Image (cartoon, grey):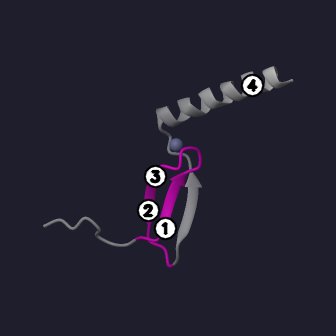
């Protein structure tokens, strides 16, 4: 029988861009590290957002 929660790991690695949980690790207290999930979708979203921001900046000025 497989247990869903094998072990409660307090360390979490989140993507700093989309906040997807990339992984967990054993830690003595709640610890969050931010990294990059390397997902193509995440990268694309960032590119889109950057482009949208550029456009709105131009229109506001
Ligand atoms: Zn991401």
Q: Which mark sits nearer the N-terminus, 3 or 1?
A: 1
Distance (Cα) linking label 4 and label 3: 32 Å
Quadrant of residue 44 in the image? top right
How crowded is the residue under tag 4: few (<14 C-alpha within 10 Å), some, or many (20+)?
A: few
Instruction: Tell me what residue is drawn at x 55 percent, y 32 percent.
Output: 45
At a point 50% along the width and 79% down the height, the residue shown is: 28
Coordinates of residue 6 in the picture (x, y in percent): 28, 70
Among the two numbered marks 1 and 4 on one chain, the one whose residue lies closer to the N terminus = 1
Residue placed under numbered mark 2 in the picture: 24
| Cβ atoms under marks 2 and 4 closer than 8 Å | no
Which span of residues is magenta-colored?
Answer: 9-28
Residue that mark 3 sits on: 22
Q: Are marks 3 and 2 in contact (CB under 8 Å)?
A: no
**Badge 1 vs badge 2, beta-carbon distance below 8 Å:** yes
Q: Secondary structure at mark 2?
A: strand
Name the residue tied to disc 4: 56
Is 43 inside the magenta-drawn segment? no
Q: Residue at x 80, y 21 (%)?
A: 58
- State the mark number for residue 11: 1
In the image, is residue 11 part of the stretch drawn in magenta? yes
- Residue at disc 4, secondary structure: helix
Mark positioned earlier in the residue sequence (2 or 4): 2
How far separated are the C-alphas under marks 3 and 1?
Answer: 11 Å
Vertical side of 59 occupied by 31: above or below = below
Tell which of 50 and 60 is nearer to you: 60
């Amino acid at each position: 029988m497989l247990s869903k929660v094998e072990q409660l790991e307090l360390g979490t690695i989140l993507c700093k861009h989309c906040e997807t949980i990339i992984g967990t690790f054993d830690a003595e207290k709640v610890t969050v590290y931010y990294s990059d999930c390397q997902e193509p979708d995440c990268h694309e979203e960032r590119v889109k957002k950057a482009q949208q921001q550029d456009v709105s900046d131009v229109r506001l000025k």
